[in-house]
Image (cartoon, rainbow, N blue to C red):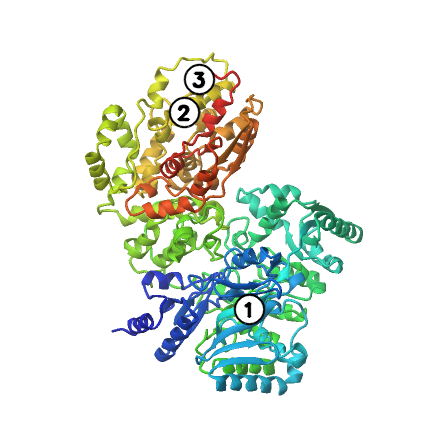
């Protein structure tokens, strides 16, 4: 028995939670959002505090370290360890109790911040610190790093909001710690020993503790030993906040809640640049804002380069640097008055251009720009990579402008680039820099730069970290910030709690070098690839590095990404987990099978290829493309799953069925034949086989009365497989709408196909041939600039996006029906239907095409529409039809979509442009849904049946 197997077996016997030493899990948990990589021996998912204690006991017996992990979004490397990693997020995630009278909450360490805030909001309360990862970061991680967020200017850091902690020390004592020198628990002798040791540490070093810390609101680096001083309440719990899991393991926390303002208003002030914005911060702070955030025009430029233009950008006042200042009030009127007073003062004192926003939806749109910065800034405007390392230094707010000027000069002297943004109200600046971490010379420059940057921030009276903690990224630099005496006291403090150095070694005390263990170093397998990866220099390795671990894909409450994770809550079903497995496959050390890897295959099996990550991920990971690439190579020269032949070749089977659709439908309706087809085709038994249309769109077109006069502009209607063979009535409706708008509608001269079903099943050779032929058919129209209108979003997404990955050709300028009418027939009249509707937006439309034009057309047609934030319908082309996927497919739909449709009255229209979406809705709710073309057809003036 190997040591690893022995450790895993002992842990499995000792804990009630899961113990996972599999290759895939170890690979996924070897990285967080930092630059570092440490592959653990075992990952444990504890269910109880007793599990935490038992896992620690087993690890000590086997001589391995223990590292606590929350959401894995830390940037310093604190959540990485080579021994046992404890993942709190899977089970220990309850809000145990909220006491609104005392304004406190008891929580388990794995609770996501937004879940706590939702529970507190029912009492008019909130938890003050709110980092940009609030939708997925855990309270345990926030306590470990002393996280802050934009509202700490009003409500302080996490340390300012902790009441007491339930902890386990490195040698296994279970204690409750709090203010006033409180340490209680079992064994009581150990509790007394810790209390006395901390008292001796403080009393014996009063001068060092009183003079050795810089005075600024965002001092997060090092241990907060000044909380042990009597004038600070001898608050042991606060002293433990920010210790990054190096002193204790957390099992429960009692935290302070604050009243949430009844109303908020947002002032946005524009300046010449971000430095000028920083200089204005001292004029803002006397107005007691809730938050003061800053960013520059370079962040906006990246958004525009990536094809994103949030509507909120139009609300930014003139300038190339901005402050976002939130103020509160007891009612909207008071909030607006406070905001207008601040705006007037800024305009008067600094000359800033200002705007005031009180609309909550508009405020959310503006904040979304800032919150996406952590991911957006990982790529420069020219596409080059940028990394953390000098991520969140902080200086006194009054010195922020001076620090930024000097910092920009330092960047220039090293030939480096970065985009500063952050919590300007507290002097904290976030930045990712285009370090070269792939070569020895680049890493050497990285090390020299960090040393100089540390000296610069210390010269400005600042802290190496103002929010994310030190970890491996900055702990080696602590002697530049603190005296030798203070560094010695840090070691003493850790030894009080963790005498054997079991907990998270290599962080804060006796740290690993900041340029060691970089995840970019190491071997690379030279695996052949098929897709072109035009945005990643033709490299799948570079594409896999897009994932920097910020974890937006593990937000389970909103958006499209990632539907299977929303159902299973398992890391291997997140975009992040899959990207890391691909990264490790290309490295070849842990995941050794290359394209034959079963770990990668199994993780990708539940990827719906919805492309939600292409738009929802801040760095535009395209897992659908990576899955297609993997399947292409994995099944090269070997039998494929049956569904790849049945569903992957669907366009071919549909054309054959079109020769005698009535006969085919009659045969397939036979229970015996249907069961046989499903079994042989790898189709879920719960699914009904679709019925082929009695006549195809193309065949109906041949008998269609010609209305062309030769004087009307021409448009090509794309007859995709689903419209042509399963729903030709949609194509007919679209034709009537386009002709009503004044266009001569034609079909391609011969059958065309985008190749989607072959792409999604990884049959890229066939897809490439099919798509090449299609482009040949369309070439004359494309060169003539004839508009091409598509009705199936997934097929349009291939023409607009995937074609560039498959072929050395630009995307096809094909439009949705809504886009075409909005651009080319904005005055086409439609009668008001005076109806309500709910819309299920297709994932590929969300990711590639956009939905704004559809919303405008529905308003023109008098539809009071509500587009659901329901994520993927769960069917997703072939995914939900394949055997083994039905439960996940249905669970994805039941999360939001099915309840929303069931709750809609019979008079409410259900809209869905995607064939998969309409099928899933019909299967699970019995409701018929309409394509936009059918709705607009109903709204044609003088419409005849």
356 sits left or right of 752 in the view: right
The percent position of residue 351, horizontal first and vertical second, equals 77, 50
Q: Residues within 10 Å of mark 2 (few under 14, many from 20)?
A: many
SS category of the residue bearing label 1: strand
Most foreground residue, 643 or 781: 643
Task: Examine the image and state in which quarter residue 449 appears.
Answer: bottom right
- Residue 32 numbered tag: none
Q: Which residue is mark 1?
A: 254
SS category of the residue bearing label 2: helix
**Mark-to-mark CA distance, 1 and 2:** 60 Å
The percent position of residue 431, horizontal first and vertical second, equals 58, 59
**Marks 3 & 1, CB-CB < 8 Å contact:** no
Task: Examine the image and state in which quarter residue 401 appears.
Answer: bottom right
The percent position of residue 569, horizontal first and vertical second, equals 41, 55
830 sits left or right of 902 in the view: right
Location of residue 465 with respect to 184 vertically, above or below: above
Q: Nearer the viewer, mark 2 or mark 3?
A: 3
Mark 1 vs 2, N-terminal side: 1
Q: Residue at x 28, y 42 (%)?
A: 684
Q: Residue at x 35, y 19 (%)?
A: 700
The number of numbered discs placed on residues in the rendered structure image is 3
**Mark-to-mark CA distance, 2 and 3:** 15 Å
Location of residue 96 with respect to 652 vertically, above or below: below
Mark 2 vs 3, N-terminal side: 2
Mark 3 vs 1, N-terminal side: 1
The percent position of residue 339, horizontal first and vertical second, equals 73, 50
Q: Which residue is mark 2?
A: 731
Location of residue 597 with respect to 704 vertically, above or below: below
């Amino acid at each position: 028995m190997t040591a690893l197997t022995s450790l895993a077996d002992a842990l499995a016997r000792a804990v009630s939670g899961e113990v996972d030493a599999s290759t895939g899990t170890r690979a996924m948990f070897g990285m967080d959002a930092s630059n570092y990589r440490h592959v653990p021996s075992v990952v444990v998912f504890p269910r109880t505090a007793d599990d935490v204690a038992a896992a620690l006991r087993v690890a000590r017996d086997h001589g391995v370290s223990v590292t606590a992990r929350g959401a894995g979004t830390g940037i310093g490397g604190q959540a990485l360890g080579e021994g046992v990693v404890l993942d709190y997020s899977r089970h220990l995630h309850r809000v145990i109790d909220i006491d609104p009278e005392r304004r406190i909450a008891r929580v388990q360490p794995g609770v996501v911040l937004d879940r706590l805030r939702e529970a507190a909001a029912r009492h008019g309360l909130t938890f003050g610190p709110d980092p940009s990862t609030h939708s997925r970061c855990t309270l345990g991680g926030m306590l470990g790093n002393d996280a802050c967020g934009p509202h700490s200017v009003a409500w302080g850091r996490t340390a300012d909001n902790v009441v007491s902690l339930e902890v386990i020390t490195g040698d296994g004592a279970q204690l409750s710690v709090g203010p006033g020198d409180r340490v209680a628990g079992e064994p009581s002798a150990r509790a007394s020993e810790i209390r006395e040791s901390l008292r001796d540490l403080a009393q014996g070093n009063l001068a060092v503790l009183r003079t050795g810390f810089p005075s600024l609101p965002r001092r997060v680096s090092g241990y907060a030993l000044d909380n042990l001083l009597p004038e600070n309440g001898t608050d042991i719990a606060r002293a433990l906040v920010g210790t990054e899991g190096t002193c204790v393991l957390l099992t429960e926390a009692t935290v302070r809640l604050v009243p949430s303002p009844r109303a908020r208003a947002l002032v946005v002030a524009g300046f010449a640049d971000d430095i000028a914005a920083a200089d204005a911060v001292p004029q803002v702070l006397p107005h007691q804002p809730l938050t003061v955030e800053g960013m520059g025009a370079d962040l906006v430029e990246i958004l525009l380069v990536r094809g994103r233009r949030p509507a909120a950008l139009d609300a930014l006042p003139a300038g190339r640097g901005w402050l976002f200042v939130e103020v509160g009030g007891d009612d909207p009127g008071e909030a607006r008055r406070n905001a207008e007073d601040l705006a007037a003062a800024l305009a008067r004192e600094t000359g800033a251009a200002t705007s005031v926003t009180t609309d909550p939806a508009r405020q959310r749109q503006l904040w979304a720009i800032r919150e996406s910065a952590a991911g957006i800034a990982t790529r420069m405007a020219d596409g080059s990579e940028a990394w953390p390392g000098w991520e969140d230094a902080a200086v006194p707010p009054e010195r922020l402008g001076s620090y930024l000027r000097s910092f920009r000069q330092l960047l220039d002297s090293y030939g480096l680039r970065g985009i500063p943004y952050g919590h300007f109200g507290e002097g904290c600046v976030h930045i990712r820099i285009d370090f070269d971490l792939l070569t020895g010379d680049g890493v050497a420059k990285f090390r020299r730069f960090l040393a100089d940057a540390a000296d610069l921030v210390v010269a400005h009276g600042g802290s190496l970290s103002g929010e994310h903690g030190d970890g491996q990224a900055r702990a080696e630099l602590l002697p530049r910030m603190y005296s030798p005496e203070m560094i010695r006291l840090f070691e003493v403090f850790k030894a009080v709690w963790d005498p054997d150095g079991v907990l998270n070694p290599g962080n804060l005390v006796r740290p690993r070098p900041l340029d060691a263990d970089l995840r970019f170093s190491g071997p690379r397998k030279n695996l052949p690839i098929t897709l072109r990866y035009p945005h990643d220099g033709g490299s799948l390795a570079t594409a896999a590095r897009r994932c920097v671990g910020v974890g937006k894909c593990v937000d389970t409450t909103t958006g499209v990404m990632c539907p299977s994770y929303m159902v299973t809550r398992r890391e291997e079903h997140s975009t992040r987990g899959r990207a890391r497995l691909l990264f490790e496959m290309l490295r070849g050390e842990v995941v050794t099978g290359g394209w034959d890897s079963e770990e990668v295959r199994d993780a990708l099996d539940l990827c719906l290829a919805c492309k939600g990550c292409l738009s929802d991920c801040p760095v535009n990971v395209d897992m659908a493309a990576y899955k297609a690439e993997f399947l292409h190579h994995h099944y090269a020269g070997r039998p494929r799953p049956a569904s790849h032949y049945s569903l992957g070749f669907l366009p071919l089977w549909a054309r054959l069925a079109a020769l005698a659709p009535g006969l085919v439908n009659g045969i397939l309706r036979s229970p015996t034949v249907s069961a046989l087809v499903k079994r042989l085709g790898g189709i879920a038994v719960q699914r009904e086989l679709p019925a082929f249309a009695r006549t195809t769109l193309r065949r109906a077109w041949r008998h269609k009365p010609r209305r062309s006069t030769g004087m009307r502009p021409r448009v090509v209607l794309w007859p995709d497989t689903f419209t042509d063979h399963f729903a030709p009535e949609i194509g007919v409706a679209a034709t009537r709408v386009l002709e009503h708008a004044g266009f001569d509608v034609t079909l391609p001269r011969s059958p065309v196909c985008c190749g989607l079903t072959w792409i999604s099943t990884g049959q890229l050779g066939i897809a490439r041939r099919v798509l090449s032929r299609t482009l040949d058919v369309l070439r004359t129209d494309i060169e003539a600039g004839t508009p091409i209108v598509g009705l199936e979003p997934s097929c349009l997404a291939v023409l607009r996006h995937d074609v560039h990955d498959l072929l050395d050709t630009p995307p096809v300028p094909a439009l949705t029906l809504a886009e075409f009418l909005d651009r080319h027939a904005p005055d086409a009249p439609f009668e008001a239907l005076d109806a309500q509707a709910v819309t299920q937006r297709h994932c590929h439309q969300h990711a590639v095409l956009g939905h704004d034009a559809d919303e405008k057309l529905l308003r023109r047609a008098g539809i009071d529409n509500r587009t659901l934030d329901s994520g993927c319908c769960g069917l997703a082309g072939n995914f939900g039809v394949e055997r083994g996927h039905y439960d996940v497919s249905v669970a994805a739909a039941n999360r939001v979509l099915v309840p929303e449709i069931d709750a809609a009255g019979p008079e409410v229209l259900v809209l869905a442009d995607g064939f998969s979406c309409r099928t899933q809705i019909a299967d699970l709710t019995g409701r018929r849904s309409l394509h936009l073309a059918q709705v607009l057809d109903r709204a044609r003036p003088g419409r005849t049946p």
